[in-house]
Amino acid sequence: MPIQHPPRPRLTLNIAITGHRAVILPAGAVAALQPVIASVFAELREAAVRLHASEQMIFDAAPPLLRLHSPLATGADQLAATIASDCGFHVRALLPFSPEEYCEDFAEGVERDEFRRQLESSGEYFALPGDRADAEGAYVLVGKAVIAAADILVAVWDGGEGNGPGGTAHVVDLALAASVPVIHVAIDRETATVGTPRLLTGGDVIDPVAEPLADAAGYDALLRETLAPHTDLERAQLAIYFAEREQRINWRIEYPLLLALLRIKAISSAPHRARSIEQDVRGDRQSLHGIEAASSSSTLDRSYGWANVLAIFYAQRFRSGHVTNYVLSALAVLLALMGLIVPSAKIFLVISELGVIGLLFLNTSSGTNGDWHRRWLQYRHLAESLRPLAFLKRSGLINTPFRSDFIHGQLHREAGADWTRWYAAAVWRELDSPRGVMTSARIRELADDVLREQVGPQASYHQVNAERMHKLDHRLHEIGNFLMGAVIAACVLFIIGYGPLHRWIQSIMGFFIFATAGLPAVSAAVFGMRGHGEHLLAASRSANTVVALEANAVRLKQASRLEPLAAALDNTAAIMLADLNEWSVAYSERSLEIPA
């Protein structure tokens, strides 16, 4: 049975571990670390349970999904994996090489056997395409994958600057630079004593910003800051979104009719009927080739389907309301002027004019009270934020998107995207991470999938949109010019005929005033549609997006290594969202209003 409301994301917490290897830990250190790390994971689990219980309005009813991402090196990594598994965490191994090659990092005998046991105990593993010829680069890459997977990093670290790239200190530095909070479990390598965990939230490894993390209240605050919405406004708008229902009928078809009348886009046989969310999800799923095993009921599919269909619904309502307001305002002027032509019907014309003005206020009030404008902008922003997530996730190297609560617009203006970025980040956390061995063939396959399923369709959409918006603006401009030309022609004829045809001119004075005052009113309404819609600006943005996507497609076609591919994927998403962010900022100032 289809769900009746937009899906709530499942509360998901992704923890990653970094720490010193057993070879550099002093004797007795592992025994000293065990109860402290066990306490950290128990506190994280209980804080997640408490957060879930207190935030039932925004999270799915399923219990929290807890994951640990660990490179499974000897020492801190393996100790954390064992403890986390006992605490109910799903363990995912992150390896710098294939499992067979990574075995060479472990001494034969007990150490290697323990690694193999830990790997078999893990729920899954992801092996990066490391090369022994560049072992340091491989360890740096796995450190980046650790940070990409983490909502919170647990670091068993002596607090020193470390021994270079790929080490514990370097991973901590990467986390702080990426705004990933770090639970620091301090270990004194001389005395094998373990300090009380503290929270690092900024700075760098040399001078981190730290605060105590000593009790349940501290863990609750950490998870709430990391996983929950931050403002009352976000929560209020989330409540509205989660209360939405599927809308299959939309009688506001004025905008599609306008496009059809201007021969911009043909109108469908049933313009008031929208396709169902299930059809939207199924259509998107059938168009995809490379996304790893996910059914049409997956969180991402359903989340995108709901946001996309609702955005289309409210966009049509808002745009139709905008068209209707300008039509009604022009009609009100024409009705007032009709009294000059049919003075005997003045009372009926006045009543009709009042009725039209009443409809104008009713239409505007409906749009304002129904929040059409905000819903359209935010639901579209959500849908487009969700669109690239599956491909970004498949790289295994891209950090959690949308850590910021703001989007950036033209001239560095900022517009709060409210809850949509929180929702997209929550869906991202829930998505399965890549698994298996990342080979050269798999890298090429991912690049090809993105070119075929994201870049190509998006470039085509923006190409069509640029042409359509340019044509719409041009035809509205032509109509406005024609109307003003008609007024000029009427005035010229009036002047020419005023002398020789004075008596006839006087007899049609009412028609003349109707034309010379009414047609400018209609022209002003047409100009208002042009100005409010900013069609040329929209066309320009779409054209620029096509150019940027095509340039980035060259990089995707050339990508043969994982890091350059991840950078190209990140840039692809940034290009698509850049247009959306500019559009969101611009249209946030274009609410439905009564034309003055």
Image (cartoon, rainbow, N blue to C red):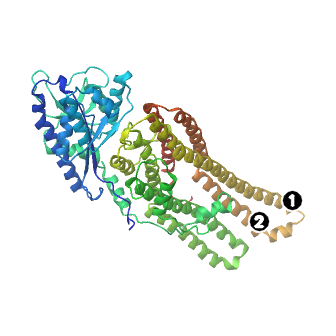
> Where is residue 456 shown, x and y percent of the image?
56, 45
Would residue 148 appear left or right of 594 to someone viewing this image?
left
Q: Is residue 570 visible?
A: no
Q: Is residue 596 above or below residue 220?
A: below
Q: In which quadrant of the rendered image does the N terminus lie? A: bottom left
Q: Nearer the viewer, residue 522 or 400?
A: 400
Label 2 is placed on what type of residue? Phe
Callout 2 crowding tier (Cα within 10 Å): few <14, some 14–19, many ≥20: some
Name the element at disc 2.
Answer: helix
Q: Is residue 231 above or below residue 108?
A: below
| Residue occupied by mark 2 | 512
Q: Quadrant of residue 179?
A: top left
| Residue occupied by mark 1 | 496
> Where is residue 110 shown, x and y percent of the image?
18, 30
Would residue 60 appear left or right of 279 to someone viewing this image?
left
Q: Which residue is farthest right?
A: 500
Would residue 109 appear left or right of 3 to someone viewing this image?
left
The alpha-carbon separation of the residues under discs 1 and 2 comes to 14 Å
Q: Quadrant of residue 210?
A: top left
Would residue 522 appear left or right of 314 to someone viewing this image?
right
Q: Nearer the viewer, residue 368 or 6?
A: 6
The residue at 12%/28% (across/down) is: 29
Name the element at disc 1.
Answer: helix
Callout 1 crowding tier (Cα within 10 Å): few <14, some 14–19, many ≥20: few
Q: Is residue 293 above or below residue 189?
A: below
> Where is residue 513 shown, x and y percent of the image?
73, 65
Q: Nearer the viewer, residue 75 or 35?
A: 75
The residue at 58%/47% (across/down) is: 462
Label 1 is placed on what type of residue? Ile
Q: In which quadrant of the rendered image does the C terminus lie? A: bottom right
